[in-house]
Amino acid sequence: MSDADKQQLMLKRPVTMKVVVTPRWKEEVQQQLQTQTGQIDKQLQELDMQSQRAIAEIQKQQGAMTNPQALQQVESVQNQVNQKKGELQQRKNQALKQLDQIGTLEMEQEVYQGQIDGFFNVQVGDNLVRKLQVEILVRDGVVEEIRGDL
């Protein structure tokens, strides 16, 4: 056996994770998304209350709302609040869209869930492209299949 045959290198690769749509998986994902939208609604309410308190405090400290400095501070608070509200609303809309998409999935369909990192050994003569193309299939939290060259 030559030295070239013995050389190995451990590398990191992205591993695609797919799930099989099952009633249990659908229910869990729908519950997570509903919880997420509820939390975003709470954040939006809290943001409104915080902005109202901040504006009231500015008005109290600065006196009349005809004061240009007070008006500028109020406008700044409102701009920050509107920006944050926009971000939160965008996240909520995305979660609601995902919730709709989950409802349209068919049972036993394979769905992309994300990527995780995995490690593998490579040696002289290995097909690197094939070794990088690995995915796992999960059903209700249990690995059902590993696809690709380990």
Image: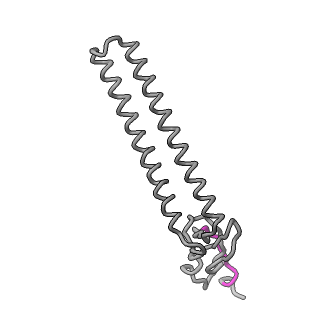
- Residue 12: x and y in percent read 61, 67
Type of secondary structure dominating the magenta stretch: strand
Q: Residue at x 50, y 33 (%)?
A: 46
Q: Nearer the viewer, residue 33 or 67?
A: 33
Q: Nearer the viewer, residue 144 or 115?
A: 144
Q: Nearer the viewer, residue 143 or 108?
A: 108
Q: Residue at x 40, y 34 (%)?
A: 81
- Residue 103: x and y in percent read 52, 64
Q: Is residue 65 left or right of residue 142?
A: left
Question: Where the C terminus falls, by quadrant?
Answer: bottom right
Q: Is residue 64 magenta?
A: no
Q: Is residue 71 above or below residue 92?
A: above
Q: Is residue 12 magenta?
A: yes
- Residue 88: x and y in percent read 45, 44
Q: Is residue 16 above or below residue 57?
A: below
Q: Is residue 122 above or below residue 95?
A: below
Q: Is residue 23 above or below residue 31?
A: below
- How is this picture coloured? one colour
Q: Residue at x 35, y 28 (%)?
A: 76
Q: Residue at x 55, y 72 (%)?
A: 106
Residue 119 appears in which quarter of the rendering?
Answer: bottom right
Q: Tell me where the magenta segment starts and ends, as one range.
A: 5-13
Residue 60 appears in which quarter of the rendering?
Answer: top left
- Furthest residue toward bottom: 1
